[in-house]
Amino acid sequence: MNLMDKGFMLINKAAGAWGLPLVTLAVCLLFISLVLIVGMLSHALVRMEYGVISSFLGSSFAMFFINYLTFPGTVNHEWSHAVFAILTGAKVTKIKCFEKPSSGQLGHIEFIPRGIFITKAIQMSVTSCAPAVTGILFTFVLIRGLMFNPNGSYTKGILLYLLFCVINHSQMSSLDVRNYFKGMIFIFPIIYLIAYFILKFMGVAG
């Protein structure tokens, strides 16, 4: 029995004891917390890498390493922001994945929130956590690829490199964290309804 099967059995058991609405609430809180934890840990990891590398090889090389040598992660980070912004109705005006090492940033996007206050808050919140959400998704996919890869060390080396890139760039800055919580009051009911119907569709009974 794999981890997913065990998790589903645990959710089903909890739903039988507590009821599906309460279990859905727990799943939503777990997901929201997981996104935040992943984003903050990734941010701390990058800061640590920068400090260690720059102390030995200089700040320019540290930025080169974090930005260019892990470029797939940078692309995922910026395009995650962009795609989530577009999906929630914001207007993306610029996407930049390459920055000079001396600029002090890995890349950036520029977007304009649109609509009323509620929709703008949702756009800011969802866009801010986008790299952490896709980071969790791609980490899961890449780890499964490593576990079930039959093609030898060369492919595993590529998967490990991509995994490192993704983990490195799943970060949420302090500004991202603030924006994440600003719109959460409006996003939470949506997350709850989606989770409820997914669990219901999966056969979780409460």
Image (cartoon, grey):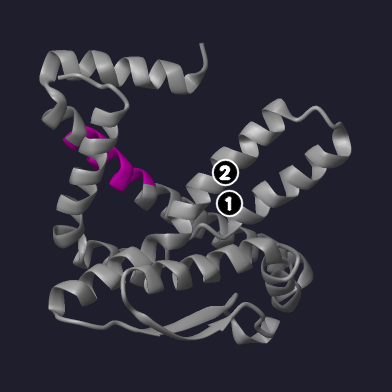
Q: Quadrant of residue 150?
A: top right
Residue 147: x percent and y percent?
Answer: 68, 27
Q: Secondary structure at mark 2?
A: helix
Of residues 1 and 44, the one nearer the viewer is 1
For label 1, the crowd category at 10 Å Cα-Cα, with few meaning under 14, some 14 to 19 and many 20 or more, is: many
Q: Quadrant of residue 139?
A: top right
Q: Secondary structure at mark 1?
A: helix
Q: Quadrant of residue 85?
A: bottom left
Residue at (22% x, 77% y) in the render: 120
Q: Which residue is mark 1?
A: 167
Q: Is residue 136 left or right of residue 90?
A: right
Q: Which residues are magenta?
A: 25-34
Residue 184: x percent and y percent?
Answer: 20, 59
Q: Most extreme residue toward the front, as rendered?
A: 201
Residue type marked 2? Thr
Q: Which residue is mark 2?
A: 139
- In the rendered structure, does residue 29 fall within the stretch colored magenta? yes
Q: What secondary structure prevails in the magenta region?
A: helix
Mark positioned earlier in the residue sequence (1 or 2): 2
